[in-house]
């Protein structure tokens, strides 16, 4: 049986994987140069022939990338000068990046741009990209960029300076970050949709709290990717807000991931340690925000502590998840459940790997080889995309699993509460319904007790197989005639029960008349037997509970049955109510 189930599930899982893989493939496709709009004007990377003055020393005609300002302290200033080349440009502009520094730009000694000088001393100066318009006849002009560190280790070198048309440079900025923009926006809206659905899933039958934390993961990762790759900066034009959001989303992400792993059951061991790690992560994140808002410590100054803690936690989490996966294999779980855990494990491990690479590149690029990171295929974007895709696939697999379980429960419920011969409810279902009806207050209902006449004669003369056909056919007539009733069931043998809410016994005559018409129509067809039945009706105004109302309807049914027997010359009447057998296949 398991083999058949697995063979049905496996193709479905493959389809889900292929469908989910379409998202990153499309994102990667749209991030390529195939969709770039070509620049209208020529652009030049001004890397050569710079005169750099720093710490009282003048370096002439050097490559900008060769400048090393290791160990810069707050207040130190670096000045870069270059003679601008002749280039045919409309709306000329130079663009470059700075980190935690105040910037002034001069053209032939005239200040044409400044950044950060409106921020108070000691306050947070963010990273940003500068777009500095030049004079129309800029060829031969001396461009001087003055960069002042707002805090220690603000920069360790100089970033690239690009000369070109203003519109081309801005468009190129977006095109270079298209993947980060697409992934960030996708994750943000995916997380938003999950957040909208999470109350229904949490309060529903599934009680799935992990969906709320998966929504937070996607939202925070979306915000972080947009801010980290400076896409948010382009649209908000608020460098402080973009930089603060980058750190806040980064600091809160590990704690939320821990919450998701705990609530989703991805880790089978070490849950107590994971809970303490979650608390530590969230406390660290909230502490960083509070210290920054109060001006005690800037939010970026806790980055080294955060990176160290994140690396340690990532190693522990990877070990725990791999051990949990091995335990899952030993337990021989079903293919669906195990596949979902494997997909989630794969995504989390890829994200952990991206964390290690990102931490390594952060310290390499910002403290050893300063360069302008232009977004695109960076590790954190791809790792975050892998994590969100694995969470999505995990929900898909679990949805398949839950649907399979739901179908199984429905099938088992049908086997337990459905009469196999007629397809209507059996006695157990009837008893359960009457018990639940007793618990309802001020409910009006009618009860019809029905007995199939002549079943014993058919069984004796034509055989039990024909008697079974008679019972099955009568069940079909009951379903059609009492289609608007809440309960249509077989109590056993030739006895049937109908209960309808919101009606009095006089209102049941229409349905009973429909049953008579159905029986007459079947009889006119001239089958091997004829349908006849006795019935009794009572309603809730005639008894203290459902059982007493049913007994009254049963007594009235037997009075009618006795009349039918006397009319047909049958000496044996039906047994009085309460003394008949509990069940049985035949009357």
Image (tube, helix red, strand yellow):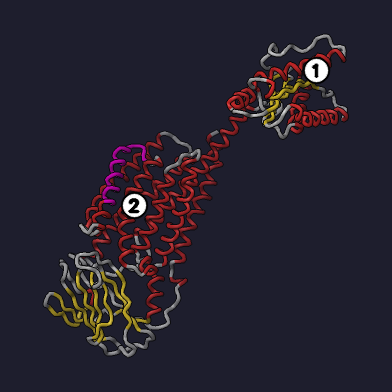
Residue 13 shown in magenta:
no
| Residue 155 or residue 574, whichever sits in front | 574
Residue 253 is tagged as: 2
Q: Residues within 10 Å of mark 1 (few under 14, many from 20)?
A: some
Q: Position of residue 383 (x, y in %)?
A: 37, 55
| Residue 12 or residue 509, whichever sits in front | 509
* Residue on which the image places disc 1: 560
Residue 409, compared with residue 453, is above or below; it is below
Residue 115, compared with residue 326, is above or below; it is below
Tell me if 122 is positioned left or right of 234 in this view: left
Residue 525, compared with residue 245, is above or below; it is above
Q: Position of residue 116 (x, y in %)?
A: 25, 71
Q: How many marks?
A: 2
Quadrant (top left, top right, bottom left, bottom right) of the N terminus: top right
Q: Disc 2 on helix, strand or loop?
A: helix
Q: Residues within 10 Å of mark 2 (few under 14, many from 20)?
A: many
Tell me if 544 is positioned left or right of 199 in this view: right
Nearer the observer: mark 1 or 2; the answer is 1
Q: Which region is colored magenta?
A: 267-286
């Amino acid at each position: 049986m398991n083999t058949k189930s697995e063979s049905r599930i496996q193709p479905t899982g493959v389809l889900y994987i292929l469908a989910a893989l379409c998202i990153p493939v499309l994102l990667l496709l749209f991030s390529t140069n195939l969709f770039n709009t070509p620049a209208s004007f020529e652009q030049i990377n001004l890397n050569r022939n710079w005169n750099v003055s720093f710490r009282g020393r003048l370096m002439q005609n050097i490559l900008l990338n060769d400048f090393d300002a290791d160990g810069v302290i707050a207040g130190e200033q670096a000045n870069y000068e270059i003679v601008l080349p002749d280039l045919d440009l409309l709306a000329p502009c130079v663009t470059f990046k700075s980190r935690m520094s105040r910037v002034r730009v001069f053209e032939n000694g005239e200040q044409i741009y400044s950044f950060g000088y409106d921020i108070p001393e000691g306050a947070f100066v963010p990273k940003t990209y500068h777009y500095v318009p030049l004079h129309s006849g800029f060829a031969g002009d001396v461009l001087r960029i003055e960069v002042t560190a707002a805090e220690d280790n603000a920069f360790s070198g100089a970033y690239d300076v690009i000369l070109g048309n203003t519109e081309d440079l801005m468009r190129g900025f977006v095109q270079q970050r298209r993947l980060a923009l697409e992934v960030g926006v996708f994750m943000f809206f995916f997380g938003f949709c999950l957040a909208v659905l999470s109350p229904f899933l949490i309060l529903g039958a599934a009680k799935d709290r992990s969906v709320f934390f998966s929504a937070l993961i996607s939202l925070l990762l979306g915000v972080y990717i947009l801010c980290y790759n400076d896409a948010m900066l382009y649209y908000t034009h608020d460098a402080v807000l973009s930089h603060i959001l980058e750190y806040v989303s980064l600091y809160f992400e590990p704690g939320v991931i821990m919450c998701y792993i705990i609530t989703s059951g991805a880790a089978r061991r070490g849950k107590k340690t994971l809970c303490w790690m979650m608390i530590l992560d969230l406390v660290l994140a909230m502490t960083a925000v509070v210290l920054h808002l109060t001006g005690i410590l800037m939010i970026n100054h806790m980055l080294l502590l955060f990176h160290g803690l994140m690396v340690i936690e990532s190693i522990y989490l990877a070990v725990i998840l791999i051990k949990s996966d091995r335990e899952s294999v030993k337990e021989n779980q079903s293919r669906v459940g195990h596949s979902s855990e494997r997909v989630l494990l794969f995504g989390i491990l890829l994200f952990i790997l991206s964390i290690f690479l990102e931490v390594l590149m952060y310290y390499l690029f910002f403290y050893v080889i300063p360069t302008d990171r232009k977004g695109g295929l960076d590790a954190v974007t791809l790792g975050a995309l892998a994590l969100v895709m694995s969470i999505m696939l995990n929900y898909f697999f679990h949805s398949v699993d839950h649907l399979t379980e739901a179908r199984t429960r429905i099938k088992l419920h049908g086997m337990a509460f459905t009469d196999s011969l007629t397809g209507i409810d059996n006695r157990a279902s009837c008893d359960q319904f009457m018990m639940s009806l007793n618990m309802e207050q001020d409910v009006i209902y009618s009860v019809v007790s029905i007995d199939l006449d002549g079943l014993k004669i058919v069984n004796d003369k034509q055989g039990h197989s024909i008697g079974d056909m008679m019972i099955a056919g009568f069940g079909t007539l009951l379903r059609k005639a009492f289609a608007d009733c809440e309960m249509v069931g077989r109590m056993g043998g030739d006895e049937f029960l109908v209960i309808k809410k919101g009606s009095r016994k006089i209102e049941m005559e229409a349905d009973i008349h429909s049953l008579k018409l159905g029986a007459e129509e079947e009889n006119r067809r001239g089958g091997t037997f004829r349908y006849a039945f006795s019935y009794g009706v009572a309603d809730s105004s005639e008894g203290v509970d459902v059982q007493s109302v049913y007994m009254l309807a049963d007594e009235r049914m037997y009075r009618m049955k006795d009349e039918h027997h006397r009319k047909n010359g049958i000496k044996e009447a039906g047994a009085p109510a309460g003394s008949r057998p509990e069940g049985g296949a035949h009357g």
